[in-house]
C-alpha cells in the first residue's frame, strides 16, 4: 500500500476552477473520505488521482512516485464507480478479471485464483457465474468492489459507490466496507455527498466547498470543533443553529441577541473579538429548562413546528426573525404556539466571524464534548 500526497492541485475547465489549489495527504492504510455538496470538486479530485482527468497545475504523488503524467494503468490504483461499470454480457467472474492481462504478468490460472479469493473475502462465490442483469444493486456493487480487490492496488478510489442503493442496504454496505478495510488495510479515498457516510466510514474526513478544502480532521473533531461556519452547518443533521449576535462584556464576554444574552466561558479561547459575530449551538446542545437550577441562564422561544423523530422530538422555534432547532425527549408534551424556556450546554458553544471562520469554541480544541458522532447524524 502507499500514501497519497497532493500539493497545490488545481483543475480548470475553461473559465471554471473546479478544484482550487488544494493540499491533502492520505496516510498509508488510511480510509479518508472527501465529502461536500454536489459540484464542490470532490469527484474531479478523485478522477485526477485516478488519471481520468488531466491536472491543470500542482503535484500528485502516490507512494514515492510523481504520477501527474502517468496513465491510469501505471498508477497502481483501482476505482469503484457509482454506476458499477459492469459489462452486461459478462459474468461476475469475467467482470472481476477484465483487463487484468493488460496490467499484470499473472497467468490465467493465477488471475482466476485471485477472483476466487476476492469472492471469498466479499462472500459472493455464488455471484461469479451470474450476469449483471441477474444481480441486485447491492450484489452488483460487491462485484464491482471485487474487481478492485483482484488488482491488489496500492490505492482504492471509491466514487459515491452507495448512492444508488436504498437506505437499508446503504447501512449494510457501510458496515461491509468498514470490515473490508480492516481486512485489507488498504489506503482508501472515498467520495460522497452524504455526511452520514463520511462520519461513519472515515478515519479522517476532508470537507470540500467550492473547490477548496475547508477542514480535514477525524469525524468527532469535525463535529465538535468545526473550523468554519460551512463545516458547522454541513456536518450534522439537523445542522448547527447559527444566529447573529453582538459580542459584549469585556473580560466576561456575552453573546447578545434580541431574545437572549448568554455568557461565553473561557474567554481566553477567543482568537479574535469583533463587535458582531455569529453564535452557534447544535440542536442536541439545547435543552428544555423545566427543571434547571435558579442560576442557570435561560431564554424563551416560540414553537412553530414539531417533528417526532422516534428517538427524539425536533422542535422548530422562532427567535424574532431567526429560527432555532432543539432536540428534546421524544415524549415531550410540546405543541406549535407554545412558549418554551431553554438553556444551552455552555461547554458546546461556538462563535464565527463575518468571514465564516471559527473564532471561539467554549471547550479547548480536542476536548471530548459529544458522546458519539453516530447519534448526531441521520442513518
Image (tube, grey):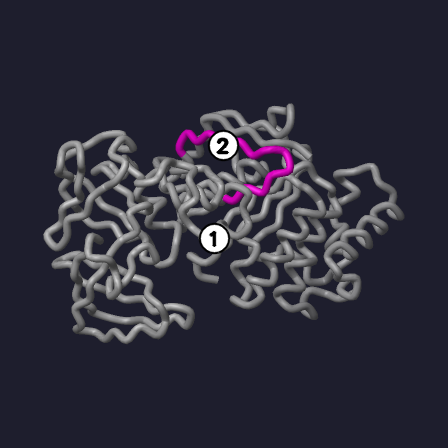
Does the segment drawn in magenta span residue 160? Answer: no
In the image shown, does 278 or 104 lie closer to the viewer? 278
**Picture coordinates of residue 198 (x, y %)?**
49, 50
Q: Of the residues under marks 1 and 2, which one precedes in the sequence?
A: 2
Whether residue 317 is situated above or below residue 269 in the rendered picture: below
Residue 13 seen anywhere in this rendered image of the structure: no
In the image shown, does 230 or 102 lie closer to the viewer? 230
**Start-end of magenta stretch:** 20-33
Residue 177 seen anywhere in this rendered image of the structure: yes
- The residue pinned by badge 1 equals 372
**Picture coordinates of residue 263 (x, y %)?**
20, 44
- The residue pinned by badge 2 equals 24
Give the label on residue 14, or none: none
**Picture coordinates of residue 68 (x, y %)?**
57, 28
Question: Based on the displayed image, in which of its 4 quarters is residue 132 positioned?
Answer: bottom right
In the image shown, does 107 or 171 lie closer to the viewer? 171
- Image quarter hosting the N terminus: top right
Question: Based on the displayed image, in which of its 4 quarters is residue 317 positioned?
Answer: bottom left
Q: How packed is label 2: few (under 14 Cα within 10 Å), some, or many (20 or more)? A: some
Does the segment drawn in magenta span residue 21? Answer: yes
Amino acid at each position: 500500500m502507499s500514501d497519497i500526497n497532493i500539493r497545490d492541485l488545481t483543475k480548470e475547465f475553461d473559465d471554471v476552477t473546479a478544484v482550487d489549489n488544494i493540499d491533502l495527504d492520505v496516510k498509508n492504510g488510511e480510509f479518508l473520505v472527501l465529502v461536500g455538496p454536489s459540484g464542490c470538486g470532490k469527484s474531479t479530485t478523485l478522477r485526477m488521482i485516478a488519471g481520468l482527468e488531466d491536472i491543470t497545475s500542482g503535484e500528485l504523488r502516490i507512494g514515492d512516485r510523481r504520477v501527474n503524467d502517468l496513465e491510469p494503468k501505471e498508477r497502481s490504483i483501482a476505482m469503484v464507480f457509482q454506476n458499477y461499470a459492469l459489462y452486461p454480457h459478462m459474468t461476475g467472474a469475467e467482470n472481476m478479471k477484465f483487463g487484468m492481462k493488460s496490467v499484470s504478468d499473472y497467468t490465467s490460472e493465477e488471475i482466476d485464483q485471485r477472483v476466487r479469493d476476492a469472492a471469498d473475502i466479499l462472500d459472493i462465490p455464488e455471484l461469479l457465474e451470474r450476469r449483471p442483469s441477474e444481480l441486485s444493486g447491492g450484489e452488483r456493487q460487491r462485484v464491482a468492489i471485487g474487481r478492485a480487490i483482484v488488482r491488489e492496488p496500492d490505492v482504492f478510489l471509491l466514487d459515491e459507490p452507495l448512492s444508488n442503493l436504498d437506505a437499508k442496504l446503504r447501512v449494510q454496505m457501510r458496515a461491509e466496507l468498514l470490515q473490508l478495510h480492516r481486512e485489507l488495510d488498504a489506503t482508501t479515498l472515498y467520495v460522497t455527498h452524504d455526511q452520514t457516510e463520511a462520519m461513519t466510514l472515515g478515519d479522517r474526513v476532508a470537507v470540500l466547498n467550492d473547490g477548496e478544502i475547508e477542514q480535514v480532521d477525524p469525524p468527532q473533531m469535525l463535529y465538535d470543533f468545526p473550523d468554519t461556519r460551512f463545516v458547522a452547518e454541513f456536518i450534522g443533521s439537523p445542522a448547527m443553529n447559527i444566529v447573529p449576535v453582538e459580542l459584549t462584556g469585556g473580560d466576561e464576554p456575552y453573546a447578545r441577541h434580541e431574545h437572549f444574552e448568554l455568557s461565553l466561558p473561557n474567554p481566553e479561547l477567543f482568537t479574535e473579538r469583533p463587535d458582531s459575530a455569529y453564535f452557534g449551538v447544535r440542536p442536541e446542545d439545547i435543552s428544555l429548562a423545566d427543571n434547571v437550577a435558579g442560576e442557570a441562564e435561560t431564554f424563551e422561544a416560540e414553537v412553530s413546528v414539531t417533528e417526532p423523530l422516534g428517538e427524539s422530538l425536533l422542535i422548530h422555534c422562532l427567535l424574532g426573525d431567526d429560527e432555532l432547532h432543539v432536540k428534546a425527549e421524544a415524549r415531550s408534551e410540546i405543541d406549535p404556539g407554545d412558549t418554551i424556556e431553554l438553556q444551552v450546554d455552555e461547554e458546546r458553544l461556538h462563535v464565527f466571524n463575518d468571514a465564516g471562520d471559527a473564532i471561539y469554541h467554549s471547550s479547548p480544541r480536542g476536548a471530548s464534548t459529544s458522546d458519539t458522532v453516530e447519534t448526531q447524524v441521520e442513518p
